[in-house]
Image (cartoon, grey):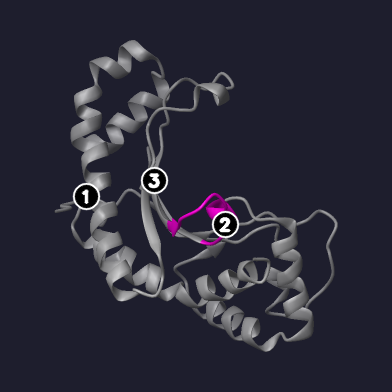
């Protein structure tokens, strides 16, 4: 059962960021297992089990990231990641093109939210088309988003706008992807069991956005 991360979790992540080499990692591997890997897996499994039980209609699966970078994509950054995450996502080869719930911990804090890791231009084009032709559903979601203060929109916008939309849809219209994020500095919540309930509540609040953007992806299948 997840009982919270700890200061040692963040200390390890700072350490691997500044000592990203095999000898340092091997000397501190047990710290990684005890303070990062184990609580991350416990958190992921508990959130997944409770969230999927509440949404049996969604064939979700849980994935926890590995600390080892892909050797083909090191680009001089060292063999280890200094940020770890888990995701609740659909199965299949094209999962990165669909909405994903996620949580991430890094040296200075943590974040969670909903996003599409690799949104296809065609998906976002369908989004703009849907807004143009029948904007009311997304307008309701955009208005609700404006009234909350937990999440921020983080997806990059096109340098050359694809079109225009009236407020509050204008904040969404020219995004290259979907990225709804709550980023937090290190706090007591990270180090407590209450993080489970926070993530469940946050993911539940994002379900209308998950369903809306999933429907856009379904139109291509």
Q: Secondary structure at mark 1?
A: helix
Q: Position of residue 112 (x, y in %)?
A: 42, 57
Name the disc covering residue 85, or none: 3
Q: Secondary structure at mark 3?
A: strand
Q: Position of residue 77 (x, y in %)?
A: 52, 22
Q: Is residue 53 above or below residue 158?
A: below
Tell whether label 2 touches label 1 (CB within 8 Å). Answer: no
Residue pointed to by mark 2: 116
Which stretch did the figure color magenta? 89-99
- Name of the residue lying farthest toward the top: 23
**Can residue 109 be seen at all in this image of the molecule?**
no
Q: Position of residue 54 (x, y in %)?
A: 30, 75
**Which residue is at a point 53% across and 82% down the rendered structure image?**
144
**Which residue is at a point 57% across and 81% down the rendered structure image?**
141
Residue pointed to by mark 1: 42
146 sits to left or right of 220: left
Tell whether label 3 touches label 1 (CB within 8 Å). Answer: no
Instruction: Tell me the crowding category of disc 2: few under 14, some 14 to 19, or many 20 or more residues within 10 angstroms, Cα based.
Output: many
Mark sitting earlier along the chain (1/3): 1
Disc 3 from disc 2: Cα separation: 15 Å
Q: Quadrant of residue 52?
A: bottom left
């Amino acid at each position: 059962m997840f009982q919270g991360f700890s200061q040692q979790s963040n200390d390890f992540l700072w350490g691997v960021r500044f000592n990203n080499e095999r000898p340092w990692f091997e000397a501190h591997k047990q710290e990684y297992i005890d303070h990062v890997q184990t609580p991350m897996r416990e958190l992921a499994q508990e959130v997944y089990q409770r969230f999927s039980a509440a949404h049996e209609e969604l064939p979700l699966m849980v994935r926890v990231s590995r600390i080892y970078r892909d050797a083909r994509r090191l680009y001089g950054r060292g063999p280890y990641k200094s940020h770890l995450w888990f995701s609740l996502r659909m199965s299949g080869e094209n999962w990165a093109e669909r909405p994903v719930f996620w949580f991430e911990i890094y040296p200075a804090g943590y974040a969670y939210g909903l996003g599409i890791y690799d949104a296809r231009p065609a998906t976002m084009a369908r989004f703009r088309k849907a807004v143009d032709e029948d904007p009311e559903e997304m307008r309701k979601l955009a208005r609700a988003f404006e009234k909350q203060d937990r999440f921020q929109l983080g997806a990059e916008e096109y340098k050359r706008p694809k079109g225009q939309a009236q407020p509050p849809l204008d904040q969404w219209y020219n995004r290259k992807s979907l990225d709804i994020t709550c980023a937090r500095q290190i706090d007591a919540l990270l180090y407590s069991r209450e993080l489970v309930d926070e993530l469940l509540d946050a993911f539940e609040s994002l379900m209308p956005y998950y369903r809306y953007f999933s429907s856009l992806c379904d139109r291509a299948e």
